[in-house]
Amino acid sequence: MADTIRLVKGDSKPVIILTLTDESTDSPYDLSPSSVSVSVRFRKANTSTLLSTINCSLVNTGTDGKVQFDFSGGVLTNLDAGQYEGEVVVSTSGAGTQTVYETLSFRVRDNLI
C-alpha cells in the first residue's frame, strides 16, 4: 500500500500524480483513447458515504499511465479532520468500469487559521 497523503482542510492542492499499471504485465495502463476516463471516489475512512468524485486529467499523452488530480472545487472545505480514502476508477465507453484494487489513503488536518 502507498504512503498516506497528508492534506489540510480547505486547501485545493496538492496535485497528486498517479501511475496506473497492469499488474500482470507490469507495464503502464494505456489511458490515451478518448473513450477512457479516470476518476477518484473520495470518502471518510470506514464509512460508505461518497463525499466526492474527482475527475483526473492526463499528465502526458496517457500512454504512460500517468494521471493527475487535485482538490479544487471545495472538496476539502467542509471535512472533519481525520482519515479518508480514495478509490481510482477507470471507465471506458462501451467496455465498462475497472476499479483499481488498492485504495489511496489520506489524512486531513484542520488548518491553523
Image (cartoon, rainbow, N blue to C red):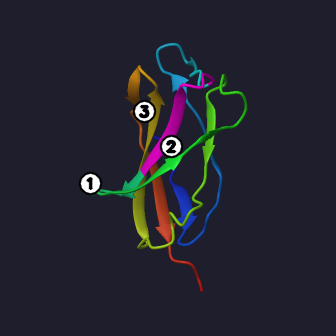
- Give the magenta part as a residue range: 32-41
Q: Distance between the residues labelled 3 and 2?
A: 13 Å
Q: How far apart are marks 3 and 1 (CA)?
A: 17 Å
Q: Mark 2 points at which residue?
A: 2
Q: Nearer the viewer, residue 69 or 91?
A: 91
Query: In the drawing, what numbered circle is on residue 100?
Result: 3
Magenta region, mostly helix, strand or loop? strand
Q: What residue type is labelled 2?
A: Ala
Counting other residues with Cα less than 10 Å from the Cα at mark 1, is it few (<14), some (14-19), or many (20 or more)?
Answer: few
The disc, 2 or 1, on the residue closer to the chain's N-terminal end is 2
The tag earlier along the polypeptide, 3 or 2, is 2
Counting residues from the N terminus, which is met first, the one under dot 3 or under dot 1?
Answer: 1
As helix, strand or loop, the secondary structure at mark 3 comes to loop
Q: Which amino acid does label 3 sit on?
A: Val
Relative vertical location of residue 95 with respect to residue 79 in this rendering, above or below: above
Locate the C terminus and report the quarter of the image it occupies. Answer: bottom right
Identified at 53% across, 33% down, the residue is 37
- The quadrant in which the N terminus is found is top left
